[in-house]
């Protein structure tokens, strides 16, 4: 269960950062959709391979 939460968090984080960067540098016009599929796949892979260490690191920031 933890790996899926990590994958979802990474996906959303990457997607938002990509959208902000595209807007700041005017590479994406208002109303133009931002692709979501590649970020879903990348977030899933990050969660699959690095999920538990990332969760432990993140929780360690607040629980120590």
Image (cartoon, grey):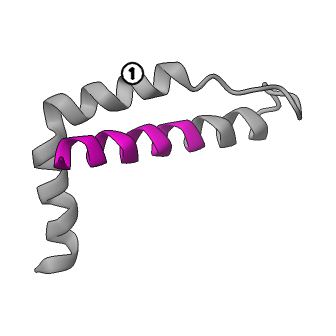
- Taking the spot 47% from the left edge, 27% from the top edge, the residue there is 39
- Left or right of residue 13, residue 55 in this image: left
The relative height of residue 22 versus residue 62 in the rendered view (above or below) is: above
Element type at mark 1: helix
- Left or right of residue 8, residue 47 in this image: left
- Left or right of residue 6, residue 21 in this image: right
**Extreme-bottom residue of the structure:** 64
How crowded is the residue under tag 1: few (<14 C-alpha within 10 Å), some, or many (20+)? Answer: few
> Residue under circle 1?
41
Front one among 27 and 5: 5
Which of the 4 quarters of the picture holds residue 56?
A: bottom left
Residue 25 position in % (x across, y down): 76, 33
Residue 33 position in % (x across, y down): 76, 26
Q: Is residue 4 magenta?
A: yes
Quadrant of the rendering where the C terminus is positioned? bottom left
- Taking the spot 58% from the left edge, 43% from the top edge, the residue there is 16
- Left or right of residue 48, residue 6 in this image: right
Residue 62 position in % (x across, y down): 22, 77
Residue 29 position in % (x across, y down): 87, 28
- Taking the spot 26% from the left edge, 41% from the top edge, the residue there is 4
**Extreme-front residue of the structure:** 1
The magenta-colored residue range is 1-16
**Extreme-right residue of the structure:** 30
- Taking the spot 38% from the left edge, 42% from the top edge, the residue there is 8
Which of the 4 quarters of the picture holds residue 47?
A: top left
Q: Is residue 28 magenta?
A: no
Query: Main SS type for the magenta part?
Result: helix
């Amino acid at each position: 269960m933890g790996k899926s939460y990590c994958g979802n968090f990474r996906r959303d984080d990457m997607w938002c950062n990509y959208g902000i960067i595209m807007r700041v540098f005017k590479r994406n016009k208002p109303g133009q959709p931002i692709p979501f599929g590649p970020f879903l796949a990348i977030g899933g892979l990050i969660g699959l391979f690095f999920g538990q260490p990332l969760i432990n690191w993140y929780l360690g920031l607040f629980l120590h």
